[in-house]
Every structure is written in structure tokens, then in C-alpha cells.
């Protein structure tokens, strides 16, 4: 049935309003229908023949397609809602965006706890819904969240965590969406998406330095020079055929996605010799305007340094984009990356920069023509003491500014203090005696959410967990392991179990929402701009959450489809 659905979704109806002869029109339509079925069967969609009852009932109408989608989507949604209700507690991640038809949509993902076949409890994130917004303000978004939860029969009191993109409409102190939710449900732990924070930290570190802004402009100009000209691309590929090494395609730099800078810089460094050769061969005004700024020591030093410094940042960004990431991983990943960036900034010993410096003079040298130049990869490069000083200063400023911005944006607020305390409490590496302050923070937090507890309740579990660790229990290695231990002993240590649930459920990013918007743009295109938000919601649920065809319970979907109304195919 699913192949039928996909065929029906792609089927295009043509309008024959300009037909003159009605009888002739009916003949054309019948011929087109038969041809369509014939082509479909040839393409492997032979199930269409099984749906045909007679010439009047073939289930090829758009209404039949919608009913197929509704039945399949309903089965998937019921499965998710059952898991949500069995989890009792949950967290939400939501964001708003504009689709191809210039309509504002709110997408929501839900994070719950699920137990695998080994009895291990892990957080799992599921697509919840996508719906339209009348206005993208705090009041409309809050009302849509509450309305959606009520429609799906999920209690608001079970909400214990929220993650957003950090926009003022989401986290505003007076009337933001998160503020409104906290007023309705005390104890919600809210986080600003770590992926957004990292990108903003890098952007602010680069935008404060004029030369780095210029470097971004040069990289985009190089990208456009080849991307929009088959002639220039052919010339580059011709030169690359005679040179050794792996070439990379030039990439565009997006200011809102600053970490895409890494791919652009690496492509320029790898293709540098061929790039300069193209500019010299072309010798047009545009080529020469790009040739001059990239053939200087200052530019080469900066881009090679960036090539080194952006690699650990790109790796951190990819780690932060992992689905179902928990808060206990955020700080260690950040600290290790900051340490690496600071080391590269102070020692200047990165792979790319070291290779570049090994091929150039240690000091500027005056040639026979009276100019300070040197040869690099077969090309003449302008040099000078001032260039070298400015290049080193730019790199130092960038590292200091970025590290400072990262520390500021990832600094602890009230909710982060609670999450940090929870991570330390369940961290088996942290010494038991150093967790006193963390226990006090957790007791105060749980008291605010209505959980009766005291320090002794948490100390008892802490003693038990560290006793297992000291005895060499190899099953307790990470915070998640200790949290699972508390969940397994819920009847003995209910307070520790409550704390473990809230730690595991705490969302740290909205990367799933961003992936959801990418999926939205793949489904609702310029050719399908009239697609309703209900149809979009169903198709996204089928695409994102639908299992493999062999694992899908088609019998349930068929029963739902058959129960909607009398079906001739069943008679």
C-alpha cells in the first residue's frame, strides 16, 4: 500500500477547462487514465490494479491519496503518543520558520525516555507536529504549544524541559514563550540551543575583525567566479588535470552558518596554486582584482591559520548536532575544544600553518627588483614585516575574541546551574565529597517542583553508587550509567530517580527542528506550494518517523482506512 501512496502523491492532474467537445474530453481523460495505470504498472506499481473495483472506482483520486496518508500517519502518531504517555515526563524542542509559500510554521519535537531490549533507559527524540502560526509572536507560539498538547491528550504538567533557538520571542524575560511555560509549570529547565550558541560565538569573534570580514568576501567572490561561469570552471579543471594532489570544490560562506567557513577555507588552501594560475591565465579585470589580495603573506598566513583553527570548531559543531545528545556531554566537549583552540592560537603549530611557514622565508627578503617577495607553489607572493605583524595580530585577536564569546554564551544561568549540578551528581568520576554543593542545588530545585526531599535522600543513593564504583563495577562508567542505576532502584531511591529522569530528558539543542525544516523544504517545494499544513504534517511524520516498509503494521493502517466509510473494494 505504501508504494501506492507514493505514486498517488506524485500524480499530477491536468486541467482541461479549454476543451470544446465534452464527449471528446471524456475520451481523452479515459485514455490518459489507462495510460497512467499502464505506465505505473510498468514502473513496478502494479498494486494499482488491485485497487480498481470498476471503471468508476479506482481509488486514484486525490481524496483517496489523502485517506491513505491519514491512515498511515495516524498509526505512526498513535505509537509515538503511547510512548509519550508511558514516559509520563517529556521535554519539547520547537522553532518557527517560513516555508516556500511564505507561511509561518511552528515545528515541534518531543524528547522522552525509552527502555531498550537490554533494560537501559535512553532519551529518544521524535517528530511531534508542524502547524501554521497566525503570527510569530510569543502569545501565538505559546497558545499553539498548549493547544497542540491538549489536542493530543498530553498533560502539560509532565513537561520538564524546553530548548529553543534563543530568540527574544522565545526566551524574553517578561513575556517570552519559555517564561510563560515556566509560569504554568514551575521547574522547567530551559536551554538555548548549543549549536546556535556556538555559531554565534564564532560569528561575533570574526565580525569584530575587519580583515576577516574581507577574507569572507574574497572566499565568496572566488566561489561565484567559478560557480557562475562554465568557462572558468573548465579552465580550473584543465589545470588541475596536470597537477598532483586532491582538489576540493569551492564553497560559499554563509554568515548565519559561520562554521561553513571551514570547508571554504580548506578548499582555497588545497586549490591555491591552481587558483592563482587561473587568475593569471584569464587576466581579466575580475581575475586580477582577486589575484592581488590572495597573493600576499598576510592572506596566506591567515587562511592557513583559519584552516587549522576551524577544524576543532567544526568537529565540535558536528558533535553538538548529534541527535539525543545529553547535557553531560556538552561541557567536556566545549572545554576540550577551547583548550585546543587556545593551544593553536598561542603556539601557531597547526598542520596547515606549519606547512606554509616551512615553505617561506623566516624573514622578509628584498629581491633584485627592490621588492619584498618570495616564491610559493610556483607563484610570486608579496611580503613585508608589516604584513607579518598584522597577520599574527589578526589571528591572536580572533582566538581571544572567539574564546571570550564562547565562555560568555556558555556561561551558567539559573537553569544551567541546576543541570551542571545534576551532571556532577551523576558523574562517577567526580569525588563524592566534592558533590556537597551540587546536592544542595538539586534539593532546592526538586523542592521547587513539588518533590519532597532532603539532603539525606540524595546522599544515600550517592553512597550506594560510589560503593559500586570503588568495588570496580565496570557497568558504571558514565553519568548515564549512574542515572540508569537510579532509575532501576526507583523504589529504593525515588528522589535520585526523579533527578535522573530530569537530567536525561533535558534537551540541549534544536538541531532536530532544523533537520525538520530541511525535510519540510524537500516536501513542500515551489511545485507543491499549495500543499496544506495538515498534509505537510502527515507527510513529514511518515518520512521522519515511518519505519521500514517491512516493519510497518499495514494491518492497523488498513483497519483505520476501512473504518472511515463504506469501501466498495471491501464489498
Image (spheres, grey):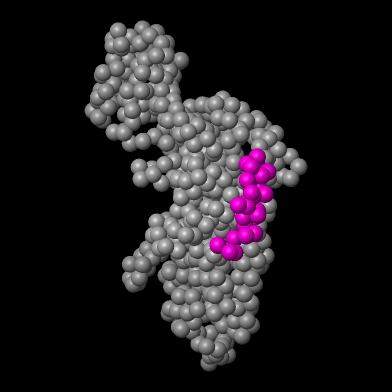
Quick check: 178 left or right of 254?
Answer: right
Quadrant in which residue 341 is drawn: bottom right
How many dots with numbers?
0
The stretch in magenta equals 432-456
Instruction: Kindly tell me whether residue 518 is visible in this rendering.
Output: no
Residue shown at the point (25%, 24%) measured from the top left: 46
95 or 372, which lies in front? 95
Residue shown at the point (42%, 32%) measured from the top left: 542
Quick check: 535 left or right of 422?
Answer: left
Instruction: Kindly tell me whether residue 348 is visible in this rendering.
Output: yes
Residue 4 image offset from top left, x and y in percent: 32, 25
- Helix, strand or loop for the magenta stretch, by majority: helix
Residue 525 image offset from top left, x and y in percent: 48, 35
**Residue 449 among those drawn in magenta:** yes
Residue 430 image offset from top left, x and y in percent: 53, 63
Residue shown at the point (26%, 30%) measured from the top left: 43
Q: Quadrant of the C terminus?
A: top left
**Residue 230 among those drawn in magenta:** no
Q: Is residue 465 above or below residue 76?
A: below
Q: Quadrant of the N terminus?
A: top left
Amino acid at each position: 500500500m505504501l508504494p501506492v501512496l507514493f505514486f498517488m502523491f506524485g500524480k499530477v492532474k491536468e486541467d482541461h477547462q479549454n476543451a470544446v467537445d465534452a464527449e471528446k474530453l471524456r475520451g481523452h481523460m479515459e485514455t490518459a487514465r489507462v495510460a497512467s495505470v499502464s505506465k505505473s504498472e510498468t514502473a513496478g506499481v502494479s498494486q494499482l490494479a488491485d485497487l480498481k473495483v470498476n471503471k468508476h472506482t479506482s481509488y486514484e483520486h486525490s481524496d483517496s491519496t489523502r485517506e491513505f496518508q491519514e491512515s498511515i500517519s495516524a498509526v505512526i502518531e498513535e505509537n509515538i503518543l503511547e510512548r509519550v504517555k508511558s514516559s509520563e515526563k517529556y521535554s519539547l524542542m520547537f522553532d518557527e520558520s517560513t516555508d516556500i509559500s511564505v507561511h509561518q510554521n511552528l515545528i515541534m519535537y518531543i524528547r522522552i525516555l525509552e527502555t531498550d531490549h537490554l533494560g537501559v533507559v535512553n532519551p529518544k527524540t521524535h517528530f511531534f507536529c508542524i502547524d501554521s502560526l497566525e503570527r510569530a509572536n510569543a502569545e501565538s507560539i505559546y497558545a499553539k504549544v498548549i493547544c497542540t498538547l491538549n489536542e493530543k491528550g498530553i498533560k502539560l504538567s509532565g513537561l520538564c524541559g524546553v530548548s529553543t533557538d534563543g530568540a527574544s520571542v522565545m526566551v524574553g524575560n517578561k513575556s517570552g514563550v519559555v517564561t510563560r511555560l515556566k509560569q504554568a509549570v514551575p521547574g522547567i529547565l530551559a536551554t538555548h540551543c548549543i549549536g546556535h550558541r556556538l555559531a554565534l560565538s564564532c560569528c561575533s569573534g570574526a565580525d569584530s575583525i575587519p580583515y576577516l570580514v574581507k577574507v569572507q568576501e574574497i572566499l565568496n567572490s572566488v566561489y561565484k567566479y567559478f560557480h557562475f561561469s562554465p568557462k572558468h570552471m573548465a579552465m580550473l579543471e584543465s589545470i588541475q588535470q596536470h597537477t598532483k594532489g586532491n582538489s576540493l570544490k569551492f564553497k560559499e560562506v554563509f554568515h548565519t552558518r559561520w562554521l561553513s567557513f571551514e570547508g571554504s577555507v580548506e578548499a582555497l588552501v588545497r586549490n591555491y596554486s591552481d587558483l592563482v594560475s587561473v587568475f593569471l591565465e584569464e587576466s581579466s579585470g575580475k581575475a586580477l582584482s582577486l589575484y592581488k589580495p590572495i597573493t600576499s603573506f598576510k592572506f596566506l598566513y591567515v587562511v592557513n591559520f583559519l584552516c587549522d583553527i576551524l577544524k576543532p570548531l567544526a568537529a565540535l559543531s558536528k558533535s553538538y548536532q548529534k541527535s539525543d545528545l545529553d547535557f553531560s556531554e556538552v561541557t567536556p566537549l566545549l572545554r576540550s575544544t577551547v583548550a585546543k583552540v587556545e593551544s593553536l592560537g598561542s603556539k601557531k603549530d597547526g598542520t596547515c600553518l606549519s606547512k606554509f611557514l616551512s615553505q617561506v622565508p623566516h624573514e622578509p627578503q628584498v629581491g633584485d627588483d627592490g621588492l619584498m617577495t618570495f616564491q610559493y607553489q610556483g607563484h610570486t607572493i608579496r611580503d613585508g614585516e608589516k604584513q607579518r605583524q598584522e597577520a599574527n595580530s589578526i589571528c591572536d585577536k580572533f582566538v581571544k575574541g572567539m574564546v571570550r564569546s564562547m565562555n560568555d554564551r556558555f556561561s551558567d544561568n539559573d537553569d544551567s546551574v541546576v543541570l551542571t549540578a545534576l551532571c556532577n551528581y551523576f558523574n562517577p568520576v567526580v569525588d563524592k565529597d566534592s558533590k556537597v554543593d551540587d546536592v544542595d542545588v538539586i534539593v532546592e530545585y526538586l523542592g521547587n517542583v513539588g518533590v519532597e526531599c532532603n539532603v539525606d535522600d540524595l546522599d544515600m543513593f550517592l553512597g550506594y553508587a560510589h560503593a559500586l564504583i570503588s568495588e570496580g563495577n565496570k557497568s558504571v562508567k558514565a553519568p548515564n550509567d549512574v542515572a540508569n542505576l537510579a532509575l532501576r532502584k526507583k523504589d529504593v531511591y525515588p528522589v535520585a530517580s526523579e533527578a535522573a529522569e530530569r537530567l536525561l530528558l533535558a534537551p540541549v539543542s534544536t538541531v532536530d527542528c532544523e533537520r525538520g525544516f530541511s525535510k519540510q523544504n524537500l516536501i513542500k517545494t515551489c511545485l507543491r506550494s499549495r500543499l496544506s499544513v495538515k498534509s505537510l504534517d502527515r507527510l513529514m511524520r511518515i518520512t521522519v518517523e515511518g519505519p521500514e516498509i517491512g516493519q510497518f503494521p499495514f494491518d492497523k493502517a488498513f483497519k483505520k482506512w476501512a473504518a472511515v466509510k463504506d469501501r466498495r473494494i471491501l464489498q
